[in-house]
Image: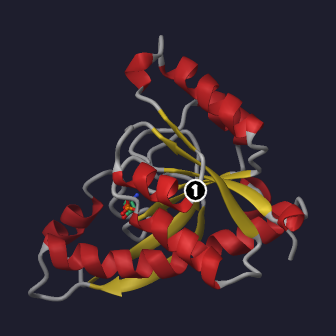
């Protein structure tokens, strides 16, 4: 597959970036993977994800929202970068911020998120802690379309993960991360294939 045929993707991240690393590694191992990460966007300059992107030679746009007049101005700056890099689809991977109207109106139906629970159960930042506190015997990982809510968009894919009696947050997180690193690149590849042909979107694919 030539570079021209790949779907140009941006990954948004605020943290360690293990999912970004997994996506890049998957693309490297699978020459037929139909996506290409052409930009990493972060609201946390210096976070792990920006270092992983830089080491892989992927362009980074990293800036703090407080450097801008407001969140809309931040998103306008992000949008300029997305357009400059001809990004067709966005994968949130530990992006700890709600996507606002500027990006949703430009990329609505082409933004997906990864979440460490079986949504709609346990939305929000403390999904793993909440699952443990609730005493559930099973949780999981969800890939879903992004809308204006917090982890509320239609589900694309889920993978169930057991919770064991002696689990703590660290052990459960590790199990969930292993699944995320397998699931997200595969789902993104399928979406990239559909985006290349204009077939996927929150309404069509959700
Ligand atoms: C992932 O576990 C994802 O489910 C959540 O944020 C975490 C990011 O981890 N939305 P990493 O930065 O990819 O390691």
The total of numbered circles placed on residues is 1
Q: Is residue 73 above or below residue 19?
A: above
Task: Let me know if residue 96 appears in the view.
Answer: yes
Q: Is residue 206 visible?
A: no
Q: Say which residue label 1 marks.
A: 57
Q: Position of residue 109 (x, y in %)?
A: 72, 50
Q: Residue at x 64, y 27 (%)?
A: 102
Helix, strand or loop at label 1? It is loop
Give whichever of 34, 50 is nearer the camera. 50
96 with respect to 58 (left or right) = left
- The residue sitting at 54% across, 61% down in the picture is 56
> Looking at the picture, how far across and down is residue 187, in whole percent?
63, 74
Q: Residue at x 53, y 38 (%)?
A: 99
Q: Residues within 10 Å of mark 1 (few under 14, many from 20)?
A: few
Q: Is residue 82 above or below residue 138?
A: above
Depth check: give the residue in front, 147 or 69: 69
- Residue 191: where, in percent of width, then height? 73, 67
Question: Where 178 sits versus 173, above or below?
Answer: below
Q: Quadrant of ligand 1?
A: bottom left
Q: Nearer the viewer, residue 29 or 189?
A: 29
User: Which residue is found at the position 42% from the left and 39% from the top?
Assistant: 97
**Quadrant location of the N terminus in the rendered image:** bottom right
């Amino acid at each position: 597959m030539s570079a021209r045929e790949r779907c140009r993707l941006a990954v948004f991240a605020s943290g360690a970036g293990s999912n970004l690393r997994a996506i890049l590694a998957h693309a490297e191992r699978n020459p037929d993977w139909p996506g290409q990460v052409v930009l990493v966007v972060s609201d946390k300059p210096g976070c792990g994800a920006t270092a992983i992107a830089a080491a892989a030679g992927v362009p980074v746009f990293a800036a703090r929202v407080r450097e801008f007049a407001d969140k809309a101005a931040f998103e306008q700056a992000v949008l300029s970068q997305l357009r400059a890099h001809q990004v067709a689809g966005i994968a949130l991977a530990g992006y700890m911020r709600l996507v606002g109207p500027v990006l949703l109106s430009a990329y609505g139906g082409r933004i997906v998120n990864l979440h460490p629970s079986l949504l709609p159960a346990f939305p929000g930042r403390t999904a793993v802690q909440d699952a443990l506190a609730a005493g559930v015997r099973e949780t999981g990982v969800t890939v879903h379309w992004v809308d204006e809510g917090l982890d509320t968009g239609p589900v694309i894919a889920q993978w169930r993960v057991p919770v064991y009696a002696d689990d703590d947050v660290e052990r459960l997180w590790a199990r969930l991360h292993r699944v995320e690193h397998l699931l997200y690149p595969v789902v993104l590849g399928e979406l990239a294939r559909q985006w290349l042909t204009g077939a996927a979107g929150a309404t069509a694919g959700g």
